[in-house]
Image (spheres, grey):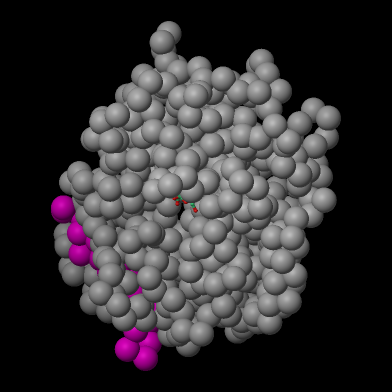
Amino acid sequence: MISEALQRARDYESRYAPLIPDTERPLFHATPSVGWMNDPNGFSFYRGECHLFYQYHPYSCEWGPMHWGHLKTKDFIRWERLPVVLAPDKLYDSAGCFSGSAQELPDGRHLLLYTGVRRKGETDVQTQCVAVGDGVNYEKYPLNPVLDETDLPQGGSRADFRDPKLWASDSGYDAVIGNRTPDGSGAALLFHSPDGFQWTFARTLDRSQNRYGRMWECPDYFPLGGRQILFVSPQDMAPIGLEFHAGNGVVCLIGEEGKSGFVRQAVQAVDYGIDFYAPQTLLTPDGRRVMIGWMQNWNTVGHRLPGCRWFGQMSVPRELSLRDGRLTQAPVRELEQYRGEAVRYRGVPLEGPLTLPGVRGRVLDMTVSVRPAGDRLRAFRLYIAEGKGYETALRWDPEEGVMELDRSGSGICQDVVHARRFPVQAEDGGLTLRVVLDRFSVEVFASGGRAAASAVLCTPQEADGIRFEADGAALLDVEKYELVFDGREGESR
Ligand code: FRU
């Protein structure tokens, strides 16, 4: 049975989504059907296809009572729209169906585990709830909620208990869930279920202890390269050097499963740019760990493209690996299938500014390498989305080992964060950068993906220039591909 609230949302999106022209959207980054999108939810394989749900408020470009929007894909690049699946239509989720995850059950059904939020007096009560479906329609479990405040360890907050991420384990399912501890900061709690419906608390995996932010949102826990990785998205982080900036961020805790739980060994940022939050991962049938994140930031979400009827987009799905103990990322290899003709330059002398014939565009996949030419290379700068007074800059100081992503000239005329500096060490005195552009965003993968940085752009599409610049002397290699969809080149749309 479809509730009135869900039917209303379905009617609304089928009426208004078709009015948004493709030219107003990115070409291969997931966006909402209409209205507002935040976190990725339920990123999972089901009957051989990858499903992606998302935090969704169809009725405006503002956050509001959360629904779950729905997309699916065969290759992580082209997304098919499906009708909204969850609306806040039960008492236990009347204030919103918050973030959660999904798994295919042995009986062929698709299980969603999400946070139901209910207002009780002055506070929210957050519980975990289940819905099952067939990839299009989902029904909420009659015995919801499946976890509530009585399942929390002592002192755990019932107002901040959310974002379950589940996976299949040897004896059923495990899930990691964010919670606020009595010291006011965050924890990642582990729960177990034999069947996906009955859940019990197992243990606390790790806690912030007020060091890595306060409430830990959207945890994820998975093996990678022989280690265990715990992702958390903390609120209210204090900055730590160039590794973590103030506010919301994403922290990667690298460790091992010891006898009594997760033993933390190293900590790093997941994305050093401006817009990245609340990522979720899945394991592909061919064994890749793929992550997708919300390409936005709660502190700068105030900005909208003028007249736009959608807000929020996901990052390109990224393959994760662990190299020399560091989390490393690359856009999913499927992106390469959409590469059009290559424009290649090798060993071009770079002293001062340079533009190269054929190297421009706003929908592309480009790899740039610079190396010092005799003299020391003192600085390298790459400008993208340039023209008509706009530009977005990547400035690299090899000596300091610091890169700056600066989008102050990207059309966002609000006093919000526009620049971030992050560590990028020279390799043999040089640098390799992969840059992925898709109309309204830039994603940068430096040094073979050891540092990723994402930012949304609002620059007019005609500003499609690319310029290179060096202080000192360098040699430059460029390999640039336009990304082509349905025989049409990205930049000509
Ligand atoms: C993270 C978050 C989650 C919550 C959802 C609500 O961005 O705050 O903790 O489930 O968004 O939309």
What residue appears at the point 48 percent right and 69 percent down from the top-left corner?
Answer: 62
Number of residue marks: 0
Give residue 72's quadrant in the image: bottom right
What residue appears at the point 43 percent right and 61 percent down from the top-left corner?
Answer: 296
In the image, 150: left or right of 166?
A: left
The one nearer the camera, 423 or 200, is 200
Question: Which residue, as the protein is rendered here, is positioned at the far front?
Answer: 121
Asked whether residue 334 is in view, the answer is: no
Q: Position of residue 427 (x, y in %)?
A: 29, 47
The one nearer the camera, 447 or 177, is 177
Is most of the magenta stretch helix, strand or loop? strand
| Image quadrant containing the C terminus | bottom right
Asked whether residue 180 is in view, the answer is: yes
Q: Position of residue 419 (x, y in %)?
A: 26, 65
The one nearer the camera, 122 or 46, is 122
Span of residues in magenta: 379-400
Give residue 194's quadrant in the image: top right
Location of residue 288 with respect to 372 vertically, above or below? above
What residue appears at the point 38 percent right and 87 percent down from the top-left corner?
Answer: 387
What residue appears at the point 72 percent right and 37 percent down from the top-left corner?
Answer: 141
In the image, 210: left or right of 93?
A: left
Location of residue 438 with respect to 172 vertically, above or below? below
Q: Position of residue 251 (x, y in %)?
A: 36, 40
Q: Where is residue 203 in the image (x, y as percent from the top left)?
A: 45, 18
